[in-house]
Amino acid sequence: MLKRADEGPRKRIGPFPEPLAALPDLSWRMLHGLRQSMPRVLLPAPHSVAPPLGRMGALEVRLATTQREVKKAQRLRYKVFYEEMSAIADIQAQVSRRDRDAFDAICDHLLVLDHDTITRSGEPAIVGTYRLLRQDVAERYSGFYTANEFDLAPLLERHRGLRFLELGRSCVLAPYRSKRTVELLWHGIWSYVLSHRIDVMIGCASLEGTDPERLALPLAFLHHNARAPEEWRVGALPARRVAMDRLPAEAINSKAALQAMPPLMKGYLRIGAFVGDGAVVDRQFGTTDVMIVLPVSAINARYVNHYGAEATRYAA
């Protein structure tokens, strides 16, 4: 899986180290046996604190457990998406100075905290966040956020026995956009994937800009080199679909195409993710979105080894 963990807006996953050949049949059962999934954190008592999922020096990653922490994550998202990037705020967002929607109430919120930076309330500053929505929760309420742009129903129907997790609304404060912070976020995600026995991560990745013609090179590269096989393919909603095959394969300069992509999107490709069929222009956030599908079975073996099959590399 959620826009960017390392350089700005929302709904995305994050970069990993260098690639290795994919391990063809890697599943959560093979990785860590029949572990019992942890109960979902439902934002309980006002002063409760979730156990850390990982730690690197002063930085800690854990889930939010209070509405106060969720509001702080929403303020962080507003600062990045609306004040720094090109998202267009509605009146509600302008008044509250928070990026929020109805999905926040049913999602888990992953936080990165800096214990060397203490706020006026005496708490460590929240410097990064990721929004996580499990399929079982989505199905009890209004579905997945990405269903507003992509037709998820056929994918979910083809894989009815698998557990899906949507990653989104990811951002990190500018001074913290480093490999170190992104790795810690991903350690938290990997811990969450293991504890909830997730089989597939989904989400959107964004190219900056709303003119598909100006994005023809990276879109065409993704179409010809990363499009999901039929088993994992997801199409953009017909009314919003923008073609990605804007250039023939032989006309693509791969090096230039990769340079035109945000690090987050390249990270998806390195780890083994697939891209859906068709893109969607998101004018509110000033981006052109592609669908990312990342089966746990397709994750490159090196990344599993890097974070540990039991998510022990940065364990607190």
Image (cartoon, helix red, strand yellow):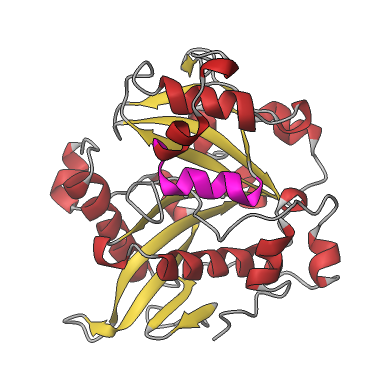
* Quarter of the rendering containing residue 6: bottom left
> Quarter of the image containing the C terminus?
bottom right
Q: Which residues are magenta?
A: 260-272
Image position of 15 (left or right of 93): right
Image position of 243 (left or right of 273): left
Residue 82: x percent and y percent?
21, 45
Instruction: Report whether residue 285 is seen.
Output: yes
Tell whether position 125 is magenta: no
Our reading of the magenta stretch's main secondary structure is: helix
- At x 38%, y 46%, the residue is 3
- At x 54%, y 32%, the residue is 147
Residue 299: x percent and y percent?
70, 53
Residue 191: x percent and y percent?
62, 70
Instruction: Decide which of 230, 97 is in the foreground and name it.
Output: 230
Q: Vertically, is 306 above or below 169?
A: below
Q: Vertically, is 190 above or below 8?
A: below
* Quarter of the rendering containing residue 120: bottom left
- At x 55%, y 77%, the residue is 53
